[in-house]
Amino acid sequence: MAFESLSDKLQNVFRNLRGKGRLSEADVKASLKEVKMALLEADVSFKVVKQFIKSVEERAIGADMMNSLTPGQQVVKIVHEELIALMGSETTELKLKSAGDVTVLMMMGLQGAGKTTTAAKLAGKLKAKGRKVLLVACDVYRPAAIKQLQVNGEKQGVEVFTMGENQKPVNIAKGAYEYAKKNGFNVVILDTAGRLHVDEDMMEELQEIKANLTIDQSLLTVDAMTGQDAVNVASVFNEKIGIDGVILTKLDGDTRGGAALSVKAVTGKPILYIGMGEKLSDLEQFYPDRMASRILGMGDVLTLIEKAQETVDEEKAKAMTQKLKKAQFDFEDYLESMNQMRKMGGLNAVLSMMPGLGGQMKGIENAIDEKKMAQTEAIILSMTPKERTNPEILNPSRKHRIARGAGVDIAEVNRLVKQFEQMRKMMKQMPGMMGGKRGKKGRFKFPF
């Protein structure tokens, strides 16, 4: 989980601070020393850490703060605000021309940073906003790079422009731009070649494209898991080519978070998007305030709601709510709720955004057995449609057949059916639990 180790350490520091009635200057300094060590261990740039601690200390050791009724809470508030400032304060939107013009985006980055996949993710995101997007295969060196872009483009329903491997990238870029103008595309995304490390050939190639085509936004894809190296790469690209924004990939696997906390301060360029998974839908807009809240274990309810609104069918949600109210839901509904949860990134992803669960996530994650959930799905899929909608007809012979179909012991089927019956019984005993009066018109309801 992103920022896991940093988040745990900071929450422990602040838990101790909150436990004290009054704070002395020594208390604040001792706590900030621990914060400093946590940030350095998270691979945040030393210069960035030094300035950050200085800013927090100047604000935290003030008469007003020390004499407040909740000094511990005030320190947390200051750290939260300074974290937001460190990552860019305001959310930076991708700058696009009007729909009648062609916006050219150039994707750059080292090999292995996920640039080609990110190009397709971004194309899908812009397509969903009503843009007509053209992906352009400018990587003529890496084996199967063109094929990878074509496969991902097809999944996103986005056309891919290619001239094969025997053309210069600058000519491919120019050809794609002319093609886009003639065929009504208003966003062109150039997937340029990466290298294993920054080299002169790569830089010259990118400079040549920039010299021969008007690039509206140069976007650098960097692997968050490389920490300080990611920040160094961003600095070099910014110096040699000029970048307008950064896309941080693999942030879901980065327990430290040093790159996310350093890149804006070191390069002066904003993080535009973050990659939070391998699926083509796993690209999120970067919100400094929401990320600061996640780091400090305050949750991220706004992103959770947005994910739900993007992935959950509202009509299905309403129907499910009615069924739950009447305790009439069946195994088909159970299966649907599991699918909806998966679309939102899985139960772990949802729980990680819930306020107050940050420090408890390890325990919760251990309790959530993904294999068990897959097994539950296999059992339900082994039922006939009639059995799913009428669980009452599940007699011993049917259960044995379902167990064989799912490749599990009959005891697992019995356990699931018993849990299901108990859940329906509980719903009947609590008819007001789904809270008809509390759901205001237009408010989103989760279907699970």
Image (tube, rainbow, N blue to C red):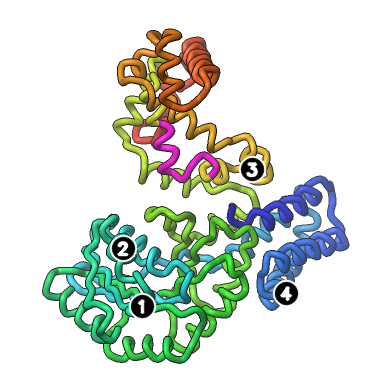
Highlighted magenta segment, given as a residue range: 337-348
Name the residue beneath numbered marker 4.
50
Around disc 3, counting alpha carbons within 10 Å, would you say few (fewer than 14), some (14 to 19), or many (20 or more)? some
Marks 2 and 3, how far apart in space? 33 Å
Q: Position of residue 241 (x, y in %)?
A: 43, 87
Marks 3 and 1, how far apart in space? 39 Å
Residue at the extreme left: 182
Name the residue beneath numbered marker 2.
123
Q: Position of residue 66 (x, y in %)?
A: 80, 57
Which numbered disc, 2 or 4, marks the residue closer to the eye? 2
Around disc 1, counting alpha carbons within 10 Å, would you say few (fewer than 14), some (14 to 19), or many (20 or more)? many
Name the residue beneath numbered marker 1.
192
Q: Up-down: is 435 above or below 44?
A: above
Q: Residue at x 27, y 90 (%)?
A: 212
Q: What amino acid type should be assigned to the residue bearing mark 2?
A: Ala
Dominant SS in magenta: helix
Marks 1 and 2, how far apart in space? 15 Å
Q: What amino acid type should be assigned to the residue bearing mark 1?
A: Thr
| Res 229 quadrant in image | bottom right
Name the residue beneath numbered marker 3.
361
Q: Residue at x 50, y 66 (%)?
A: 248
Q: Residue at x 31, y 20 (%)?
A: 385
